[in-house]
Image (cartoon, rainbow, N blue to C red):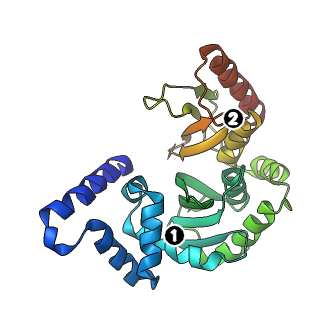
Amino acid sequence: SPWKASLMRSVFMRVAGVMEPGAGTPRESLAEKLAAATDAPVGDVLDLIDSMGSGYLAAHTNEETAAHLAVMSRLGERPAAVASEGNVVTVVAPDHTGLLGEVAGVFAVHNISIHEAKLWTRPDGIALDTFSVSDVRSGTTVDPQRWDVILGDLEAAAGGELDLDALVTAKRSDYRRAIVARSVEVAAPPDPSQRYTVIEVRCADQPGALFTIVGALYRAGLDIQVARIETMGTMVRDTFFVRDGSGQPIRDVARLAQLTAAIRADLRTRL
């Protein structure tokens, strides 16, 4: 699984320098490889590696890290930058509350299904998000020529120029595939690290599902720190690591029960 692959990558990075001490540190070797692959200065690559920490390297392949470097160089003064390679899409943009919802909403409007997401933010507030996607209608890779239009809509969404709620609702009503009738499930399993509150949502897959779920979390006053997006067959199983408006995890059991009930009720009226 991707999770087990990230663990193995982390082990490799830690052991490589010990096994081959004369070959340079894994950090320096990786920086040289990524610089060669992206034409980025080695110093810029090292800055990214150092600022993001070992968790970032463990969670991303060399190709994904290279994509982040390449797309960051194109951001400039634009609200967002996008690059696609096969079924993997990289979105780089200034992070802000609602960014994930904007991306999910625009993707839904353009018939793009998100199967997995890796969300990271640099210390300077730039989000480096990687999505595994497919075309909803064909189930295959999204045509690369469509990404220019999608980027335009992402920029419009970031500027508040798109009514994504209305667009996603219209898209859902036009969707002809039968949706599996299942109730929405919302749970709050404990977080062993106690750094976050974990909210897990399960429901039938449908256009704009992630957009609607993220919106419900925002409306509940939650700030998404990390998201694990999974679509298996006709079902969505998304896990969000969140904090409240004050930046703290929610540890009060009664408050958490009320919160999950409110999110469940919200989603059942919209999905």
- Secondary structure at badge 1 equals helix
Q: Where is residue 217, by image quadrant? A: top right
Mark carried by residue 8 = none
Q: Which residue is mark 1?
A: 68
Q: Badge 1, how many Cα within 10 Å: few under 14, some, many 20+?
A: many
Q: Badge 2, how many Cα within 10 Å: few under 14, some, many 20+?
A: few
User: Closest to the observer: 246 or 71?
Assistant: 246
- Secondary structure at badge 2 equals loop
Instruction: Using the rendered image of the protein, determine whether residue 134 is visible from the camera's viewpoint.
Output: yes
Q: Decide if residue 44 is on the left or right side of residue 34.
A: right
Q: Position of residue 251 (x, y in %)?
A: 58, 22
Q: Position of residue 123 (x, y in %)?
A: 56, 58
Q: Position of residue 2 (x, y in %)?
A: 38, 51
Mark carried by residue 246 = 2
Residue in view at x 43 percent, y 63 percent: 50
User: Closest to the observer: 39 or 109?
Assistant: 39
Q: Decide if residue 245 is on the left or right side of residue 225.
A: right
Residue in view at x 22 percent, y 73 percent: 24
Residue in view at x 73 percent, y 42 percent: 215
As shown in the figure, which amino acid type bears the numbered disc 1?
His
Q: Position of residue 83 (x, y in %)?
A: 57, 73
As shown in the figure, which amino acid type bears the numbered disc 2?
Ser
Q: Where is residue 240, by image quadrant? A: top right
Mark 1, mark 2: which one is toward the viewer? Answer: 2
Q: Residue furthest top?
A: 254
Sequence-wise first label, 1 or 2: 1
Check the picture and name the quadrant holding the C terminus: top right
What distance separates the C-alpha of mark 1 from that of mark 2? 30 Å
Q: Is residue 13 above or below residue 215?
A: below
